[in-house]
Image (tube, rainbow, N blue to C red):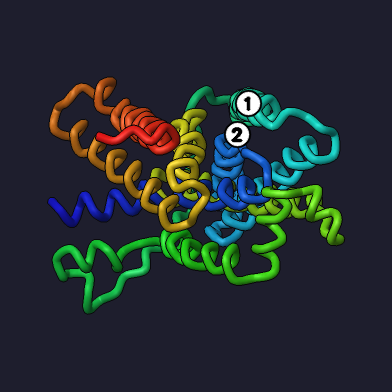
Amino acid sequence: MADDVIAAALLMTTPVLLAAIGGLLHRVSGVVNIGLDAMMLVGALAAFLVSAATASWLAGLLAAILVGGAMGLAMSMLITRLGANEIIVGLGFNIAFAGLVRFALKAGFGVSGTLTRPDVVMLPRLVVPWLRDVPIIGALVSGHDPLTWLAWALVPATAFLLARTRMGLRLRAAGAAPAAARAIGLRPRALRDAAGLAAGVLAGLGGAHLSIGVVGVFSEGITGGRGFLALAAFYFGRSRPLPTALGALLFGVFDALQIRLQGRGVSADLVQTLPYLVVILVLAGMALAERRRLHGVRP
């Protein structure tokens, strides 16, 4: 049972972690990306359709990258070039693209809610033969798809990028002190747009993981608000890669647990709220801890 929970937790962590790393990069550059959920949704649909049409999961991932990146760049440019409010733009993206996807399903495929394709190609599982049957360790390192490995590889890579590279320094300067960055010849708006492009690409891949990595179908509610869980994860991690990953893993664990509880006869309507209740409790705890720190309140 423990191995099943671990495997399920890592599986459910992957889309949240991918989107959270993208949102973190955009946040470090100075933009809070509220539209991650829309990018995940459209990425999931693109990956599903292209995977089925081409019989290639790689083509599906490429489609998710292209549409997610385009959406991320467009959203960022609305904010940086036109001065639009980032919260309004993000919420607008979420609402508009949810409606567009619903319309596309009805107009293009004659379905409402869920789209299935028998020829969709799922992401492969990478099995380590000499470890797959080892308790705990096998569940941690064997049987995972390429996007799961990518998501966790991005954690140290992002930490290195932000702390040790010139690009990371420029991104942090664009977010922390854009006027000073411009004074030394940097272009904060271009840096923010590049971070928006990266956020869209990773959110699109997160959506692709849901449709061709987890369930093998597409539905209007496939993201289940995971874009907002990603937003909570990088706030939980205070825009640091490792704590952000731990936050995403926390939500993944509770997401896996609610699936297990449904299988044991517990009310689905009740247990489906579990990951989101955890988000509220974690963020409330962080707010209280920050308040104590700022006001010097000692227990």
Q: For the residue carrying disc 2, how many other residues have a C-alpha within 10 Å: few (<14), some (14-19), or many (20+)?
A: many
Q: Position of residue 21 (x, y in %)?
A: 53, 52
Task: State the residue at coordinates (27%, 63%).
Answer: 140
266 relative to 65, above or below: above
Q: Position of residue 250 (x, y in %)?
A: 32, 45
Q: Tell me: residue 156, above or below residue 246.
A: below
**Amino acid found under the numbered disc labelled 2:** Ile
The residue that mark 2 highlights is 34
Q: Are marks 1 and 2 in contact (CB under 8 Å)?
A: yes
| Residue 182 tag number | none
* Left or right of 276 on screen, residue 62: right
Secondary structure beneath label 1: helix
Work out whether residue 40 or residue 124 is closer to the camera in this orientation and state it: 40
**Quadrant in which residue 191 is drawn:** bottom right
- Viewer-side residue, 91 vs 183: 183
Q: Is residue 107 visible?
A: no
Task: Work out how far the residue at label 1 is from the one at label 2, CA to CA, in angstroms.
Answer: 6 Å
**Rendered position, 194 above or below 90:** below
The secondary structure type at the circle numbered 2 is loop
Among the two numbered marks 1 and 2 on one chain, the one whose residue lies closer to the N terminus:
2
Residue at the (17%, 69%) spot, across then down:
133
Q: Is residue 67 left or right of residue 205?
A: right
Rendering quarter of residue 236 = top left
Which residue corresponds to mark 1?
Answer: 91
Label 1 amino acid? Leu
Report the residue at 64% width, 71% height from top. Answer: 165
Q: Quadrant of residue 258?
A: top left
Return the x and y of residue 93 as percentages of the image width and height.
Answer: 66, 30
How many tags in the picture? 2
Residue 175 position within the rendered picture, expressed as x and y whole percent measured from the top left: 68, 48
**Residue shown at 44%/43% (left/top)?**
233
Q: Is residue 6 visible to the viewer in this orientation of the structure?
A: yes
